[in-house]
Amino acid sequence: MPEQKTYRVLIGKPGLDGHDRGAKFLARALRDAGFEVVYTGIRRTPEEIAAAAVQEDVSAVGLSSLSGAHLRLFPAVVEALKNSGAGDIPVLGGGVIPDEDIGLLKDAGINEVFTPGTPVEQIIAAFRSACETQEARRT
Amino acid sequence: MGKHSEYKDWEDKELASSLNRFPERKERFNNHGGEEIARLAVPDQIDEEYIEKIGFPGRFPYTRGVQPTMYRGRLWTMRQYAGFSTASESNLRYRYLLDQGTTGLSIAFDLPTQIGYDSDHPMAEGEVGKVGVAIDSLADMELLFDQIPLDKVSTSMTINAPAAVLLAMYVAVAEKQGVESSKLKGTIQNDILKEYVARGTYIFPPKPSLRLITDIFRWCTDHSPAFNTISISGYHIREAGSTAVQEVAFTLANGITYVQAALDAGLELDNFARRLSFFFNASSDLLEEVAKFRAARRLWARIMKGRFNAMKPASLMLRFHTQTAGYTLTAQQIDNNIVRVALQALSAVLGGTQSLHTNSRDEALSLPTEDSVRTALRTQQVIAHESGVASSVDPLAGSYFIEELTDRIEAEASELIAKIDKAGGVVAAIEEGFIQRQIENSAYEYQQEIEKGERIVVGVNEFKIDEESKPPLLRVDPEVENSQIHGLKELREKRNNKNVEEALANLSACARNTSNLMPEILAAVKTYATLGEICQVLRNEFGEYRG
Amino acid sequence: MSEQILKGLRDRDPRGIARAISLVEENDPLADEILASLDDSLVDQAMVLGITGPPGAGKSTLTDRIISKYRSQGKRVGVIAVDPSSPLSGGAILGDRIRMMGHALDQDVVVRSMATRGRLGGLCAAAGAAVRILAGSGCSPIIIETVGVGQSEMDIIRLADITALVLAPGLGDDIQAMKAGLLEVADLLIVNKADCAGAETLAMDMESIAREGSGKEKDSAKVCMTVASEGKGIDDLLAAIETVDASHRESGERKARREKAYDLEVLDWAIEMIKPSIIKKIEEGGLDRKGDPRMQAVKLLEKE
């Protein structure tokens, strides 16, 4: 009966990649885990994703890319968030991402990186923890 | 006991004519031991039900295949989808594949090209040359087909929203090689409807998109009659998460929409229907996939006959390309993917595909390396030359399991098509979100089964190991984007910009009236107007679709 | 912290506005201060437009076009897009933004997605406050977009000064049932996808139901025809909205509605505020679980 905190997150697909099976699955899985999930649809610029994240006041942003453009696009979202005064919002990313890129992405400010085959429970836990951290930072 | 009259009739007509025109690959197909393998196994007692449901290959309802001798006459086309980085680099890969025995090219374009952006467009940032080759203008297309004689190869191009522009560039390159457009063989995907629901590379709203498609139909009928003007694709619908039944239903429903649009545009059914081709996914459930291909073929023949009164056999036949299922490939223990691909490819061959792409083992990680592409091609060659399944036509026919499943898939797909009809057709069903929802729900269930361990994926949720070594990956050099942008800048300085502007103005005017867009697009690409410039003109006239 | 948010709100900083809405939605102690800081005259003058209709009618696309039109008139537009929460998990997918992403970089289009959160009324309270925050930050009109199905969505529509009902041909049989209830609250009827077969019939149908409807002044019940995907009919629609708005302002209808909405929100807030203390009492074991639960509730409230 105690009211559990409802976290708001945003799932975005930066770039031109239209493969949103993974993004949509995750959005639904997060909903089923009690999150409110703003979904931006495909083919968004990093700036659009950042602006939506700000307006929706989400506690975390999740990005998905399968086209190999993640090294350019994920850090660009982090950058765009900073430029909107929302650099504190944690960003998580997933997709077809070679192992050797994970370090580069983390260095660029991506909190967590998920590769194909990661159990969804693990991804949900990462979102929850990112939201909790963000919430604690705010209060 | 003599042969059933229908059987005899088929032998005298379809079979005889086929053998006459295309002799089989061998005089006799033997097993090891010298016994002859039957061309076509049939039941002892042929009855009405057999004739109505299963029949004979090359004859309505085409359950057993579209040609009377199938692979005994000619093997399927081994067509490996490839393309990355720049035109010159892709050109090298195509020439390598042709050397290795592929029999058709299949061009992968990068995302900016597929969405009608030049490489220097802000939206193209980071995407240039990534999932395919970057084509900005005719100049790139000339490099892409350098030393590849276009009258000798058949070329499939995975291009949809800007298909007319890429086709025009292809025609223009051929012209420079001295090859007439009437000699060109190949396929453009040109299937916009599935982009709205599954693949995402749409540009324009449905109405003008359908106009572009029917303009291509008409232009090709007159100028390039051997070109397949559309490849109606279930592949991506399945990749997006649909079931086998949904794949068939949504694909054929899209097919119905294109046929209707062409009829509405005043085209003659038998002129364009024979140039419709299809593209399906070969997924992991081997027997279900075989039944799916057979059901799709039968259902399409019945639709063309029943709904559209098509008469000519060529208009009734569902000819299709197949690709093994990308979504089943795993990033774990990637060699297992070779086995998955082999089984999936086998289902496509047992299902009677006309051409086949086999995925490479490392595609869940990145673009395939040359080594893995070769193994993928070899997989097809093993099936073709060693497995024996190519020696007899539709060898699984008559299996209780296969026939029942074929019937069921056909019936369920028909029902789903009826639902779409009731909702006002495909375009209305897309706008309402019906098709997207169906696919999403199936995808969600499938993935939940994996997450809960109810569906075993070897190496992912069972039979896991600690993997240390990672295979070598192919990466696209980030420099490609810069060099592509540089080339574009040079082109814009070098070309006659007055001609370009004129051609674009003509195109713009044409878009506002109802005349065929193809001649204007062809004229524009010849001035080296870029893909992005041409698409921008059309964007201005047609508006953009928002997903 | 509070200073920062209040300043952000005053400066119309997107982050400040967004944080303010969240804090009010979460019933944070800062909510009072935030709401008290709003410019009353802006809140009073803003036009609140409700857009409702069944899934697939094209509400989001229509909203997108309406935004474009108001933007071309130089107006700053707010949008509250409401989606249902899952009754099982309490989560929600908020997807209405997708169709409006073309305005994402326009700082004068403030879009906020909101889930119903299965609250007892509370949605009205939260959404009403969000509307006022948007109004206080200079937005007018403010569009509330919601699927007109559940009770909470019907309630939220009561926050609007003007309500438009969007239907489209070919949406199936369940629309019929929905129509009656929605038509009661609608000031404007829109047939979207007017280029599709069945649009004329639907329009006539709606008109006649509206005319019969409930003795309200529906003589002017005019049906606007739009093709949102192509931007057609939007000018006429905006003109119709303006006409209704003017007549509501003149007749006092607008004032009457705002008073009703005010009362409704007070009730909602009161329920929201009282709930935690009751939950706390129950959790602390204040129940002897004797007699009927209803009697327990009476006892519990007596102790309040």
Image: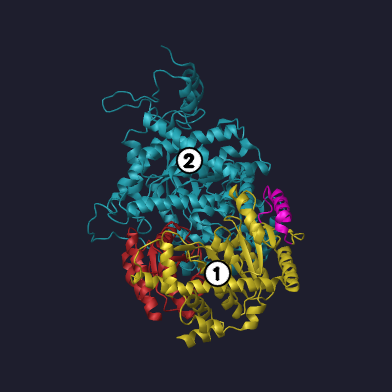
Amino acid on which disc 2 is placed: Phe
Q: What colour denotes chain B?
A: cyan
SS of the residue under disc 1: helix
Disc 2 designates what residue? Answer: B320
Q: Both on one chain, marks 1 and 2?
A: no
Residue depicted at x 47% and y 44%: B246
C235 relative to B513, above or below? below
Furthest residue to the top? B1
Front in this rendered view, residue B488 or C49: C49
Tell me where residue B538 appears, x and y as whole percent.
64, 59
Q: In the image, which disc is placed on residue C124?
A: 1
Chain letter for the part of the structure drawn in red: A
- State the predominant SS element of the stretch in magenta: helix
Residue B4 in magenta stretch: no
Amino acid on which disc 1 is placed: Cys
Which chain is home to disc 2?
Answer: B
Front in this rendered view, residue B241 or B315: B241
SS of the residue under disc 2: strand
C50 relative to B81, above or below? below
Label 2 crowding class (10 Å Cα cut-off): few <14, some 14-19, many 20+? many
**Dividing the image into 4 quarters, which one contains the C terminus of chain B?**
bottom right
Image: magenta residue range: C192-216
Tell me where residue A23 appears, x and y as whole percent.
43, 60
Chain letter for the part of the structure drawn in yellow: C
Front in this rendered view, residue C181 or B141: C181
Front in this rendered view, residue C44 or C21: C44
Residue depicted at x 53% and y 79%: C17
Tell me where residue B292 appears, x and y as whole percent.
43, 38
Closer to viewer: mark 1 or mark 2: 1
